[in-house]
Image (cartoon, rainbow, N blue to C red):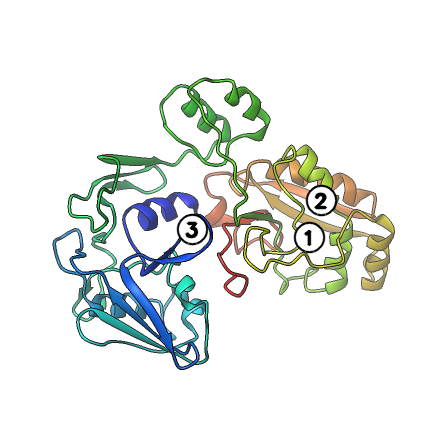
């Protein structure tokens, strides 16, 4: 569940029915068009003519139906199951049309169909054939070494004219930030994500390096498992909100390349975004008030972090430890292993660093 797999296996290898463009608008992708009726409860997607899978098989409505059903039902283990809870029925209407019937109207439903989980896979014996790696995308899978690299080559039969632009691509997993920067600087790689902000100025001085910075949907978070003590106590959570100096983290860790999110997952680039109030700033007195209310005036908690979550996570945790100490809270920063972070920490440790890539609409997020 990381940018590596999302980019290689969703973006390059596969297509969903729709995609979101650079302006945040939903567009047809493997679908040629879509239309709604019955107060946005019924959605019909017409597939592109001539679209094929990498094995030459024509994409049919049944492939779409089985691909979506893979994520539906009580037995599925899919992370996208909740996205499709609103779907009462999905069926083919001829070989080129797929009809969704929703439990209630949803004007954003085409956006949900762009989700990176919901790529279209070939049907085999009435089920989605996920294991073959055969998809519809601009590139065909050549070799995959989990946690190391994914190599893909150009799909000569891609349904989008003039694309892809490259003959082959390779995605390399470089979790160490310094190694990632070094790989770019030496020309070993052509592009990296999540640059080191501390060395951004140095990178800008290199004549062959271009820095691209836009306001996206992503946000860095410190999620708590609210079913586990002491985070099951809302007063403890409120105390921690007031014990963190968010602006200091923006200034010192992200060097101004961020904005304070105020526990709001809706990025400013999303249509209809709101900035909820009150703004939580560093306030030791309020933090102590909520600690006292919780009956935990000598609170001690572990915060599990690694820069695998986001570049600067470890340093941010250190700042949090310092400000929390002024509020009577002992934050024990646990520096976790980078390479096993998503296996050993995420959804297992009660308080950790993480990030969300965000979603294109407020309702979806």
Instruction: Identify the residue at horizontal 36%, vertical 57% (top origin).
Output: 27
Pointer 2 with pointer 3, Cβ within 8 A: no
Instruction: Identify the residue at horizontal 33%, vertical 51% (top origin).
Output: 10
Q: What residue is disc 1 on?
A: 262
Q: Nearer the viewer, mark 2 or mark 3?
A: 2
Q: Using the image, determine if residue 171 lies above or below residue 105.
A: above
Displayed quadrant of residue 189: top left
Instruction: Tell me the CA gap for discs 1 and 3.
Output: 25 Å
Q: How many marks?
A: 3
Circle 1 SS class: loop
Q: x%, y% of residue 196?
A: 54, 30
Displayed quadrant of residue 305: top right
Circle 3 SS class: loop
Q: Using the image, determine if residue 176 lies above or below residue 112.
A: above
Q: Nearer the viewer, residue 309 or 118?
A: 118
Instruction: Identify the residue at horizontal 73%, vertical 38% (top origin).
Output: 248
Please rate how many residues cluster around mark 3, counting C-alpha atoms within 10 Å: few if below 14, some from 14 to 19, many from 20: few
Q: Nearer the viewer, mark 1 or mark 3?
A: 1
Q: Nearer the viewer, residue 9 or 318?
A: 9
Q: What residue is disc 2 on?
A: 246
Residue 98 as seen in the image, left or right of residue 257: left
Q: x%, y% of residue 140?
A: 21, 45
Q: Residue furthest left?
A: 56
Q: What residue is disc 3 on?
A: 1
Circle 2 SS class: helix
Q: Nearer the viewer, residue 215 or 90?
A: 215
Instruction: Identify the residue at horizontal 41%, vertical 24% (top origin).
Output: 183
Instruction: Tell me the CA gap for discs 2 and 3.
Output: 27 Å
Q: x%, y% of residue 79?
A: 42, 62
Pointer 1 with pointer 2, Cβ within 8 A: yes
Looking at marks 2 and 3 on the same chain, the residue that comes earlier in the sequence is marked by 3
């Amino acid at each position: 569940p990381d940018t590596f797999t999302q980019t290689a296996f969703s973006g390059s290898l596969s297509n969903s029915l729709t995609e979101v463009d650079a302006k945040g608008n939903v567009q047809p992708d493997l679908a040629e068009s879509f239309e709604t009726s019955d107060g946005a409860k019924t959605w019909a997607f017409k597939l592109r003519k001539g679209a094929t899978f990498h094995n030459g098989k024509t994409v049919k409505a049944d492939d779409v139906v089985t691909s979506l059903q893979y994520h539906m039902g009580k037995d599925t283990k899919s992370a996208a199951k909740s996205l499709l809870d609103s779907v009462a029925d999905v069926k083919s209407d001829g070989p080129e049309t797929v009809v969704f019937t929703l439990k209630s109207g949803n004007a954003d439903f085409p956006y949900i169909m762009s989700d990176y989980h919901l790529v279209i896979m070939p049907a085999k014996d009435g089920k989605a054939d996920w294991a073959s790696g055969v998809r519809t995308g601009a590139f065909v899978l050549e070799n995959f070494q989990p946690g190391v690299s994914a190599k893909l080559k150009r799909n000569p039969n891609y349904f989008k004219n003039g694309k892809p632009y490259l003959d082959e691509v390779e995605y390399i997993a470089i979790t160490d930030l310094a190694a990632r920067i070094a790989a770019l600087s030496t020309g070993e790689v052509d592009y990296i994500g999540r640059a080191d902000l501390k060395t951004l100025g140095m990178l800008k001085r290199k004549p062959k390096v271009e820095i691209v910075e836009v306001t996206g949907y992503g946000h860095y978070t410190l999620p708590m498992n609210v079913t586990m003590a002491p985070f099951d106590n809302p007063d403890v959570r409120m105390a921690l909100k007031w014990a963190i100096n968010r602006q200091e983290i923006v200034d010192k860790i992200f060097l101004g390349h961020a904005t304070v999110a105020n526990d709001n997952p809706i990025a400013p680039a999303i249509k209809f975004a709101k900035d909820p109030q009150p703004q939580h700033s560093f306030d030791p007195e309020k933090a102590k008030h909520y600690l006292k209310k919780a009956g935990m005036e000598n609170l001690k908690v572990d915060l599990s972090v690694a820069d695998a979550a986001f570049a600067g996570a470890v340093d941010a945790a250190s700042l949090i430890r310092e400000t929390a100490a002024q509020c009577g809270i002992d934050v024990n920063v646990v520096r976790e292993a980078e390479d096993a972070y998503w296996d050993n920490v995420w959804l297992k440790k009660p308080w950790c660093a993480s990030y969300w890539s965000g979603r294109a609409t407020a309702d979806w997020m």
